[in-house]
Amino acid sequence: MAKLKNVLWIMADQLRYDYLSCYGHKTLHTPNIDRLAAMGVKFNRTYVQSPICGPSRMSFYTGRYVRSHGSTWNGFPLRVGEPTLGDHLRELGVRCSLVGKTHMVPDAEGMKRLGIEPESVIGNFVRECGFEPYERDDGLHPTALSHHSNLAYNEYLRAHGMGGENPWEDWANSAEGPDGEILSGWYMQNAHLPARVPAEHSETTYMMNRGIDFMEEAEGPWLCHLSFIKPHWPYMAPAPYNDMYSAKDLPPVVRTDEELRTDHPFLKSWQETRVSECFSRDDVRDRVAPVYMGLIKQLDDEMGRLLDYLEKSGRLEDTMIVFTSDHGDNMGDHWLGEKDLFYDCSARIPLIIYDPRPEADSTRGTSTDLLAEGIDLAATFVECFGGNAKPHILEGRSLMPIIEDRVGSWRKYAISEYDYSTRSPRRALDVDEADARLIMVFDGRWKYIHCEGFRPMLFDLETDPGEVVDLGAVAEHEQTRERLRQEMDRWSRTHHNRITISKARIEKLTDIGEPPGILIGYWDAPKAENSDTSG
Amino acid sequence: MAKLKNVLWIMADQLRYDYLSCYGHKTLHTPNIDRLAAMGVKFNRTYVQSPICGPSRMSFYTGRYVRSHGSTWNGFPLRVGEPTLGDHLRELGVRCSLVGKTHMVPDAEGMKRLGIEPESVIGNFVRECGFEPYERDDGLHPTALSHHSNLAYNEYLRAHGMGGENPWEDWANSAEGPDGEILSGWYMQNAHLPARVPAEHSETTYMMNRGIDFMEEAEGPWLCHLSFIKPHWPYMAPAPYNDMYSAKDLPPVVRTDEELRTDHPFLKSWQETRVSECFSRDDVRDRVAPVYMGLIKQLDDEMGRLLDYLEKSGRLEDTMIVFTSDHGDNMGDHWLGEKDLFYDCSARIPLIIYDPRPEADSTRGTSTDLLAEGIDLAATFVECFGGNAKPHILEGRSLMPIIEDRVGSWRKYAISEYDYSTRSPRRALDVDEADARLIMVFDGRWKYIHCEGFRPMLFDLETDPGEVVDLGAVAEHEQTRERLRQEMDRWSRTHHNRITISKARIEKLTDIGEPPGILIGYWDAPKAENSDTSG
């Protein structure tokens, strides 16, 4: 396989798969992202490994399931020693750089135990989840936390005349009232107002500039993870994106009264959280969702600027470009707000891969319904830089066979996990924190959701693409549930930690039997012809 | 709880639970180990987490299941960053020292990735599985491997007039023929002959001396893991232990013709390995098992010397003493040799704990049928030194409540795993290396054995204590199999890697909801009375 020189891996945060025109949105036109899709392969059915920032990203960055890397919720540190994409790429001589968000929280206790100095070169990689941070910015810097104090973006805003203790909050994520008072973007009643920051200095534009800065400076080969915070909340856009769309541009909300009458204790409890109740209000959705669209539109405009830059700089000829997100946004569907749970609006993401090599010509502009997982990207990147995808460590599958139109058998299920141990429904349901676990198994038609301690949920996306009819207790679907339950348990039982020994090494050890000189179960000296060492 | 000063943790290698007189052996009298049992608690039903040295020991030394630490077979490196008993004890100010065997293979690749110098203090802990090696000796040093070249025991033998390239092999594990020729202990036809080494310089005696040396020198508090290689093969004992027993002293072999007619492909394949066929011969068992008994008898004699030393030195008053082994030896039972698989002769071990504190007086000299697992020891040691047993990391349960006669509810199942990926039956059965997995779930009566890709096995130890009737395909036991299958899968699905966050921290995070300043799903400023942050 011809080698690519670089990979530019773009990630939006909280971007639903269906809020792009190439994925079917009717009123939100995203011609630049659509242009990328026309240049590459659009993956129609891609699922994240957890529908929440931290765990999803740790899966992207390690190429491993959430149960494997163990960072099951935002802020749960990634254990020291967990191999990262950056580790694998550095072995191949490739820089793995970060511009933007990762949501990584390092395992300070583990680093101390192993004597890894946080400020050392390796310590920095460990703290940054394997990335070399060109610019790290997780994009959430409330004044009440200290995150903002050393934020480069705050320095930037100040240099452009937007000052105060925390310009991120006061300019980029606040509006102004008629009397000059600051109206916080945290309160969704203000969502339709323009952010105080002009678009040219907003977070999306700033981070795109930084991405281009990196590419201007960097020698290849590199992977650049250009990772935007928006359209993640606070839902507040700079002009003109703040009022580019209105409630009439929204797709119909997907929810039914039957859903509210669910007998599933877990789902009921989730519907009853404050956030879900808030997003179930029409006035909230009608105000927030158009701004969410505006933020996506802004990102698309910036993507246009990026594609122009890539074309002009020659990078379109030697750089793979990947566009994706870390999870979606329920945005009132199913009587839910935020992400979480496994409805398509939350667990399904857009994924577009442009590969400039001639080997990818036959799939250019096509799309595929094959099931992809977020963890497939790490394996893809390792392979596209000529490495071994290390299946004993990387649990995803390289997408290169799809991109090169040479795919044979493919995975039958996409899997996602969710740990609700820190969420209020756990207490309401009186579940032990260790048992607050959900697992989704989706086979392309049937979505099975295991809720530890409760009955499963089941949706048939063929007859019910909106996922509003829970078949989890319907007798006629028992066989389907049993089949998917078996797949889930089979997957749970597999090795998730046997990462220090390759498949090739195991085959070699099987050939050898026992090390030289270790003679087990011999009555007398083995004759040359029967010196096998089986058992 | 009053603190103990030290822990002396003795481990024999490959010692079956039933080859001690306190565990019911009729002809092998082990008065010294029995004396320890009379001073403490004898655990009647203790199972290792894998019936093979390396994985079993990595579970003992990490306090975690094999699927959690990932070192699933001998020589598969323990991943860097896996927390060890030694790490937990050092936090408590306790030295964790090793005298003898661990079977640890370090994760050199992971250490390099994290910049951990092998020769540094921390690097040494990582390489030695958390132990401070007073003396490391894995006890298997064939001349064909280079292990022997720097072996302290070889230096010792040379200093006592036993020279040559590799005295371990040529003196401690070889006999002499009538014409002075060296007869190798690897060949079991020689097992009955006396080793060339005199008992006083044999491995068992040498390592006991080294353990006493350590205790003479060490300041407490310490844990000393005194870890003997024998009665592990090569089955060769010094005089007089080599011919202290004969075939007439052996318990009847446990095997039936029905077992040979098994329709279970896995079991059939295992019976057909060379080692199993060899140990199925009466002449082999009749020659080897008496020597195995002799090696145990020697260990018991050394235990007598140890107990005398401990009494004289005052250690009986301030030191917990634990006696156990890492797995058993099939010794021809079930037409099998070696360890492996989950028959009691292989997966069940002796476990005796002497605790000198008055709190343990009420259980002194008693035994318990409660199910114990090898991983319980790490949690026990952490607790007995006053630490928190860290249930998010340590998967075993402290045995202190049993020792102090205050146990409430207890575990319902013991679990053990086995990875046969490098074994010849895997090829014979055409199983992918990743699927070569077995799991045992034993509830105190029913032993359920999951064989990935094959039907399960099931034994009823109440009606069939010899485990010769496989009920894995008998229709009337379907409910029992289903119940244990469900327990296995439930256990497989639990967190095994969420080790960076404590239960207390999760409860605290649940209380908090979201970090300060992060306001999700608010239409307007929350009023003081409804400022909960659920969801």
Image (tube, coloured by chain):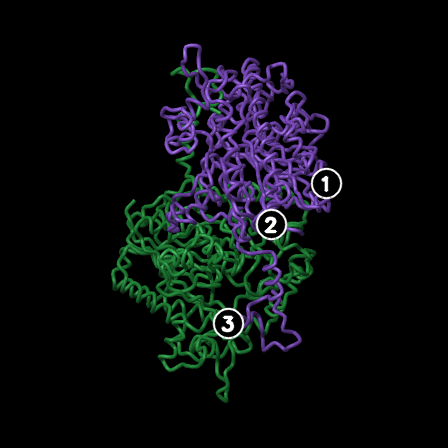
Chain colours: A purple, B green
Please give the name of the residue rendered at 72% of the width and 40% of the height, measured from the top-left corner.
Answer: A363
Q: In x, y percent, where is residue A207?
A: 50, 33
Q: Chain of mark 2?
A: A
Residue type for callout 1: Thr
Q: Which residue is nearer to you in this view: B316 or A164?
A: A164
Q: Which residue is nearer to you in this view: A45 or A334?
A: A45
Please give the name of the residue rendered at 55% of the width and 13% of the height, measured from the top-left corner.
Answer: A283
Please give the name of the residue rendered at 43% of the width and 39% of the height, measured from the top-left corner.
Answer: B501
Q: Chain of mark 3?
A: B
- Quadrant containing the C terminus of chain A in the rendered view: bottom right
Residue type for callout 3: Leu
Q: In x, y percent, where is residue A232?
A: 52, 27
Q: Is residue B494 visible?
A: no
Dot 1: element:
helix
Instruction: Compare marks 1 and 2 and give the one earlier in the sequence.
Output: 1
Dot 2: element:
loop
Residue type for callout 2: Phe
The label shown at residue A337 is: none
Mark 2 crowdedness (10 Å alpha carbons): few <14, some 14-19, many ≥20: many
B32 vs B283: above or below: above
Which residue in the protein does label 2 denote?
Answer: A385
